Amino acid sequence: MKLITEEIKTKLASNKGDANVDKPYLKLFSPTGAATWLITEMVDEDTLFGLCDLGMGFPELGYVSLQELESVELPFGLKVERDMYFDSMTVGELKKESK
């Protein structure tokens, strides 16, 4: 499965600015663990920005390499996947919902 489509690239390119208002248009996850990435911006063809949670209880805003995520090899031959049913909302809305 392709991690990022042209449609999602266009949406991410329009997000530049306040992290509380920007919407994550892309959710990536590990099907064998708790790692999740909510991506709000695409800086260039390889660099993404968003909320990165490796499942250790310390999510943080930061940059991640698309190439690195695509190259991750998980148990049972699985790879990082895109949540095809992810419904975008602002980071501020996500914070309110998680309380």
Image: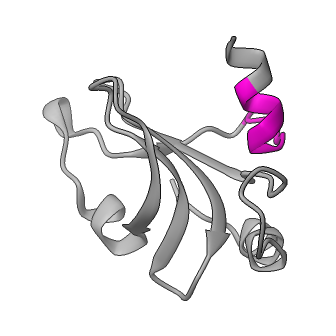
Please state which of residues 84 and 59 is positioned toward the viewer in this rendering.
Answer: 59
Q: Residue at x 33, y 23 (%)?
A: 57
Residue 84 placement: quadrant: top right
Q: Residue at x 52, y 70 (%)?
A: 48
Please state which of residues 15 and 1 is positioned toward the viewer in this rendering.
Answer: 15
- Residue furthest out toward the bottom: 44
Q: Residue at x 79, y 22 (%)?
A: 96
| Span of residues in magenta | 85-95
Q: Is residue 72 above or below residue 65?
A: above
Horizontal side of 19 relative to 72 (left or right) equals right
- Residue furthest out toward the top: 99
Q: Residue at x 73, y 35 (%)?
A: 86
Quadrant where the image shows the C terminus: top right
Horizontal side of 12 relative to 76 (left or right) equals right
Q: Is residue 91 magenta?
A: yes
Q: Position of residue 42 (x, y in %)?
A: 62, 76
Q: Position of residue 15 (x, y in %)?
A: 80, 71
Please state which of residues 99 and 90 is positioned toward the viewer in this rendering.
Answer: 99
